[in-house]
């Protein structure tokens, strides 16, 4: 990996931690952070954010998003096995997305909770684009189904967090008012 690629990946991981800190601070471990030493033989994920979730972060150029989607999901699943964590999710950075739009597309072999309504796509880029188009405030998931690859589910970070909360019963605590 070239230094510019490594720097891009490091920036993506730092931004991913910040995204979790902003969206769901109540779910995070104390001192949520990037894990150093990526690529270790027994790699357990890129981030230490939620105690029972292995997270793999990918920041690819637009023309390589399909590769990023599959690498994120597969890497997270392998890392969850190494770490003995029940949940695995990949995070793929949306190139050039503004902060108020879908900035992260989450991808997993197994979504944390059952999905009532789901769209279907046969290409990773079509699935990715559908999540981005749905918007940050719309709970939306896409099943990526190809004959030659395992099925994946994609959604935005808020959609994944809502499913995780539903699956684990770790609902957001009410904010105290003054």
Image (cartoon, rainbow, N blue to C red):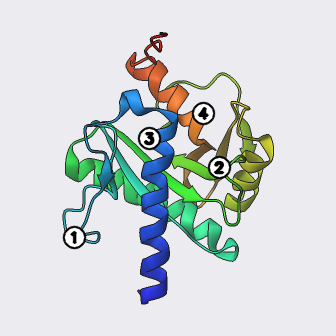
> Looking at the picture, does residue 132 appear above or below residue 168?
below
Measured Cα–Cα span from mark 4 to mark 1: 30 Å
Task: Give the Cα separation between the discs numbered 2 and 4.
Answer: 19 Å
| Residue tagged 2 | 145
Residue 62 at what x, y percent from top left? 69, 72
Q: Earlier in the sequence, mark 3 or mark 4?
A: 3
Instruction: Look at the numbered discs 4 and 1 and tell me whether their residues touch, using CB distance below 8 Å.
Output: no
Q: Residues within 10 Å of mark 2 (few under 14, many from 20)?
A: some
Sooner in the amino-acid sequence: mark 4 or mark 1: 1
Residue pushed farthest bottom?
2
The circle on residue 40 is 1
> Label 2's element?
strand
Say which residue appears at 25% left-offset and 38% top-offset: 30
First of labels 3, 2 by sequence position: 3
SS label for mark 1: loop
Q: Are marks 3 and 1 in contact (CB under 8 Å)?
A: no
Residue 93 sits in quarter: bottom right
Q: Which mark is residue 21?
A: 3
Q: Nearer the viewer, mark 3 or mark 1?
A: 3
Instruction: Say which residue label 4 marks.
Output: 159
Q: Say if mark 3 contacts mark 4, CB within 8 Å.
A: no
Q: Is residue 121 at least partly visible in the picture?
A: no
Of the two numbered discs 3 and 1 on the same chain, state the one appearing first in sequence.
3
Query: Does residue 174 appear left or right of residue 118 in this picture?
Result: left
Residue depth check, mark 1 versus mark 2: number of the one nearer the observer: 1
Q: Quadrant of the N terminus?
A: bottom left
Give the Cα separation between the discs numbered 3 and 4. Answer: 16 Å
């Amino acid at each position: 990996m070239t230094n510019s690629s490594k720097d891009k990946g490091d920036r993506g991981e730092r931004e991913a931690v910040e995204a979790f800190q902003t969206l769901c601070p109540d779910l995070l471990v104390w001192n949520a952070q990037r894990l150093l030493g990526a690529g270790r033989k027994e790699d357990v994920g890129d981030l230490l954010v939620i105690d029972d979730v292995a997270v793999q972060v990918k920041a690819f150029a637009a023309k390589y998003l399909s590769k990023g989607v599959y690498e994120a999901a597969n890497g997270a699943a392998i890392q969850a096995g190494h770490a003995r964590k029940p949940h695995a999710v990949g995070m793929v950075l949306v190139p050039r997305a503004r902060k108020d739009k879908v900035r992260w597309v989450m991808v997993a072999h197994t979504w944390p909770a059952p999905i009532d309504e789901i769209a279907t796509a046969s290409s990773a880029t079509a699935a990715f684009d559908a999540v981005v188009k749905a918007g940050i405030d719309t709970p939306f998931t896409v099943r990526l189904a190809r004959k030659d690859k395992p099925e994946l589910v994609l959604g935005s970070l808020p959609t994944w967090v809502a499913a995780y909360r539903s699956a684990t019963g770790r609902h957001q605590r009410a904010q105290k008012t003054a």
